[in-house]
Amino acid sequence: MTTVVNVSGVGKTYASGHCALRSVDLDIQRGEIFALLGPNGAGKTTLISIICGIVNASAGTVSVGDLDIVNDFRKVRGQIGLVPQELSTDGFESVWSTVKFSRGLFGKAPNPAYLEQILRQLSLWDKRHARIMELSGGMKRRVMIAKALSHEPDVLFLDEPTAGVDVELRRDMWEMVRGLRERGVTIILTTHYIEEAEEMADRIGVISKGEIILVEEKHALMDKLGQKQLRLQLQQPLTALPVDLGDLPLTLADEGRELIFHFDTQSEHTGIAEVLRRLDQHGIDYKDLQSRQRSLEEIFVSLASDSRAVKNTAANEGVAV
Ligand SMILES: Nc1ncnc2c1ncn2[C@@H]1O[C@H](COP(=O)(O)OP(=O)(O)OP(=O)(O)O)[C@@H](O)[C@H]1O
């Protein structure tokens, strides 16, 4: 694995005095799909805008393919494609001339065959003569992707690629992004949609309040934190758990109508048989039971609150974090 993007100690304080990023370190590997997850205002757009040279960092350094983004700005920009969150393009131009113009901006020689290939891939070939203003929102978003790919970048940034697009188009986009990765393009995407990261990413980074709180290979993250739950719908609601069952990791939910048992998918014995036996001994009957893995959404929520808890504890103890 080689590192294609290196972010080292990057901080950003806007002119308003707002600190959007605090000493972020991050390495992106060549050929991976990396998803940057985080709530509104976490600093995702700020981080990718710094890497793409649109926003200046207040501290730290960024290199892309061993080139410094400040000293080698033009060369770096040529290696990067950015699909911004906001759709911004001239509505009177045709799809074809928009994409052709974009390629020219990077000083690349014309290559109609390549542009045809990306427009076909994005299902825009039939619309190549249409003016942008005549396209649907989803098509406009695909034009933005075609523009970002027009100069054959090695690294593609997608800022909330599927915000506001329908389920079908979202799936098409995921398919297309995977196709790009197969052609060797490194993809960095920001998203609020946990299912998007879960579906697509090789690795996931979680950012919260301007700090990267976790970077992990997706499957390892799911295995490590993806506890399974066994949920039992009880015949009779319980007001409290019997004291004798206090040694089991059980919680009552849904006003006592549901019992939840957490177990570790990694361990040899899940403990399910014992739980069911002990419930039986206590005469606790259930009408239904299901088991399911924690989603990344739940993992993310618990990570964000864990990191807050760590900070609060450290702050209360006077520890610098
Ligand atoms: N130009 C700016 N001037 C001042 N503050 C800014 C500016 N741009 C962003 N911010 C602030 O920096 C913080 C991080 O914003 P950013 O857009 O990076 O978050 P985000 O994670 O991309 O959020 P979202 O998911 O809503 O797009 C926010 O509090 C935002 O209000």
Image: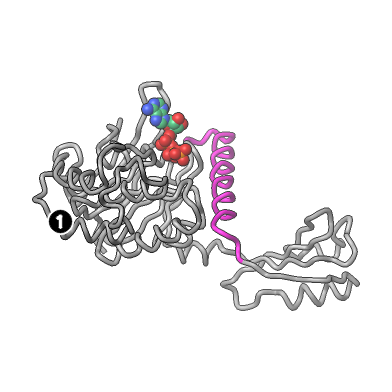
| Residue 296 counted in the magenta span | yes
The quarter holding residue 257 reads bottom right
| Vertical order, 130 against 202 (above or below) | above
| Quarter occupied by the N terminus | bottom left
Residue 280 location in percent, x, y?
86, 75
Which three-letter amino acid code belongs to the residue tagged 1?
Pro
Q: Is residue 73 visible?
A: yes
Q: Is residue 148 visible?
A: no
| Residue 10 counted in the magenta span | no
The quarter holding residue 131 reads top left
Give the residue number, with chain letter if any, for mark 1.
Answer: 112
Taking depth in this image into account, of 313 and 117 the one nearest to the observer is: 117
Residue located at (8% from left, 50% from top): 109
The quarter holding residue 284 reads bottom right
Residue located at (80% from left, 61% from top): 258
SS assignment at label 1? helix
Q: Which residues are magenta?
A: 293-321
